[in-house]
Image: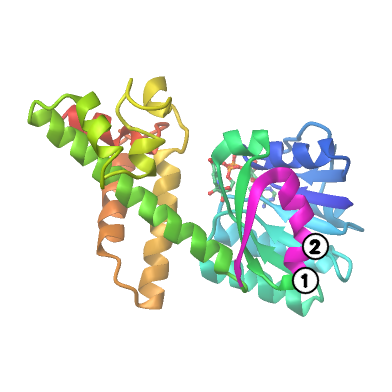
Amino acid sequence: MKIGFVGLGNMGAPMAANLAKAGHAVSGYDAAGVTAEGVAPAATLAEAVTGIEAVITMLPNGDIVRAVHADIVRQAQAGALLIDCSTVDVDSARAAHDMAREAGLLSLDAPVSGGTGGAAAGTLTFMVGGSDAAFAKGKPLFDIMGQKAVHCGEAGAGQAAKICNNMILGISMIGVCEAFHLADKLGLDRQAMFDVASTSSGSCWSINTYCPAPGIGPKSPADNDYKPGFAADLMLKDLNLSQTAAETAGATTELGRHARDIYAAFVESGGGKGRDFSAILDKLAKQ
Ligand code: NAD
């Protein structure tokens, strides 16, 4: 397939490289001029998307996605598939779908979980919104870049799934960090706390798989001085998206809001800069 890839950053570059490695003809464009292995560099967005069958975007935020997709729909050939894998607000995702539909193009919102490691290894999970026809056309590409693609529903459903999942993650990570912090204060050994909670009703991904306490449980960013992993500022971005969505939709998400405020304070104080989102435990321990 002839594929255009727009946004060759930490995530986009390895995803585009995996498509090229699988034998697709990939042309890549990034505003910063960066390229990816096996990908033909395009000097302009128009060059990357002209005559292609599918375009994938992996961009920082909703405003950029809206602007780039407005340009893409003017250049892409009828019937082409537009896939946005960025994490953005549901309204921007739906706006991108509307632009594609009006131009006679297929479209999917398909944010990912799995981070830069998953992007490099081709083991991402895609949460996908859009029509059955668009999903069927995109599925072979998801199978190259990832290990799972869930068709969540119509336009915007992928972004909705992503922000709901990450709201759970932000809340549960804070809960696990506070429990370790309380255990410390009570003189309870961290290993004993892990052994109990990870096999009891407190078990969850944030403790069992991604334990924020160094030296305990499977290897995680805590064992690498909290180098991300999943950076605290990206968690803050996702918690802001879920709060904006909750306000628009009229949903009550009080713990989501509290988690957002905790990550905002962590990032804005400078304590979370360049650190994994599980470093909340380190912050509590140093108080
Ligand atoms: P990044 O900043 O490394 O990459 C974004 C790229 O987009 C940059 O190279 C930038 O130059 C390019 N870009 C910006 N504006 C552009 C434009 N107008 N035209 C073309 N290129 C443009 O970010 P990333 O870590 O690759 O994340 C990309 C998206 O994936 C974000 O929405 C992020 O929330 C999401 N995401 C990231 C991770 C992660 O672990 N990094 C995990 C899941 C989801």
Q: Which residue is mark 1?
A: 133
Q: Which image quarter is the C terminus in?
A: top left
Say few, some or many: other residues with alpha carbon within 10 Å of mark 2 (under 14 / 14 to 19 / 20 or more): some
Q: Residue at x 68, y 76 (%)?
A: 98
| Relative to 15, 79 lies left or right | right
- Disc 1, ligand 1: is the CB inside 8 Å? no
Residue at the extreme right? 51
Do the residues bearing badges 2 and 1 touch, measured as CB atoms within 8 Å?
yes
Q: Is residue 144 magenta?
A: yes
Q: Give the secondary structure at mark 1.
A: helix
Mark 1 belongs to which amino acid? Ala
Q: Residue at x 20, y 34 (%)?
A: 180
Percent position (x, y) of residue 236?
A: 39, 49
Percent position (x, y) of residue 268?
A: 32, 42
Percent position (x, y) of residue 284?
A: 20, 34
Q: Residue at x 43, y 25 (%)?
A: 219
